[in-house]
Image: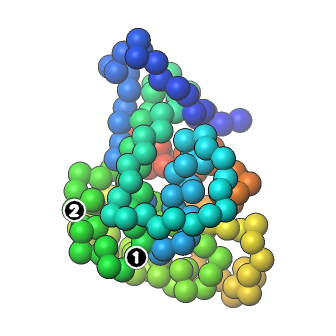
């Protein structure tokens, strides 16, 4: 059973037991980064694609087993190469990074590039890798063809493994 659950924090709740963490979400364009964050926020799955311009910040609050409110401010960054120059500023004071790819072999290959890029600007920050769209058939969806292993494999459409992902992320950033 999960120790984290999404909660709606009311105005009357005190902020003294709220732990806030900045999480930067990166990955190639079209891998489902915005959908991932929106699904965490309780929104329905949408099939239409709208590219993120620059960054969108979404805050999601969870309640931990130790009764702390954990507030992940997730910076959903644009995956397009043309936004690469401004992306470095988003890494400043980050507590953790999620690299999201999908079952396309090219986005999986690019995970190593994302890791190298992140390490240049924040070498000691924990990084989590997630493969999305595991519910979609793909030529590269075969385990034998996979480029690397991932911390998690999930589907934003089916909401798989969210609790485990959030628990693991909380464990990484609270250290």
Name the one closer to the observer, 152 or 139.
Answer: 139
Name the one closer to the observer, 162 or 59.
Answer: 59
The spot of residue 131 in percent (x, y) is 60, 68
The spot of residue 17 in percent (x, y) is 37, 21
The spot of residue 129 in percent (x, y) is 51, 65
Q: CA distance from mark 1 to mark 2?
A: 16 Å
Label 1 environment density (alpha carbons within 10 Å; few <14, some 14–19, many ≥20) = some
Is 8 left, or right, of 15 in this rendering?
A: right
Is 152 left, or right, of 88 in this rendering?
A: right
* Vertical placement of residue 147 versus 3, above or below: below
* Vertical placement of residue 72 versus 9, above or below: below
Q: Residue at x 60, y 40 (%)?
A: 42
Which structural element holds mark 1? Answer: loop
The residue labelled by disc 2 is 89
Which structural element holds mark 2? Answer: helix
Task: Specify which label sits upstream in the sequence, 1 or 2.
Answer: 1
* Vertical placement of residue 10 versus 140, above or below: above
The residue labelled by disc 1 is 80
Q: Residue at x 56, y 55 (%)?
A: 36
Q: Quadrant of the N terminus?
A: top right
Name the one closer to the observer, 5 or 57.
Answer: 57
1 or 2: mark nearer the eye: 1
């Amino acid at each position: 059973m999960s120790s984290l659950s999404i909660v709606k924090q009311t105005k009357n709740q005190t902020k003294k037991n709220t732990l806030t963490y900045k999480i930067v979400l990166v990955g190639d364009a079209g891998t489902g980064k915005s959908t991932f964050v929106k699904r965490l926020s309780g929104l329905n799955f949408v099939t239409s694609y709208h590219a993120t311009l620059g960054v969108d910040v979404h805050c999601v609050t969870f309640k931990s087993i130790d009764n702390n409110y954990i507030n992940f401010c997730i910076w959903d960054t644009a995956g397009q190469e043309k936004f690469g120059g401004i992306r470095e500023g988003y890494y400043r004071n980050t507590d953790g990074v999620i690299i999201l790819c999908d079952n396309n072999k090219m986005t999986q290959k690019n995970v190593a590039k994302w890791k190298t890029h992140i390490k240049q600007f924040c070498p000691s920050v924990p990084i989590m890798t997630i493969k999305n769209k595991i519910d979609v058939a793909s030529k590269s969806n075969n385990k034998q063809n996979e480029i690397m292993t991932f911390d998690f494999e999930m589907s934003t459409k089916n909401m798989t493994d969210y609790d485990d992902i959030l628990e693991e992320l909380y464990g990484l950033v609270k250290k």
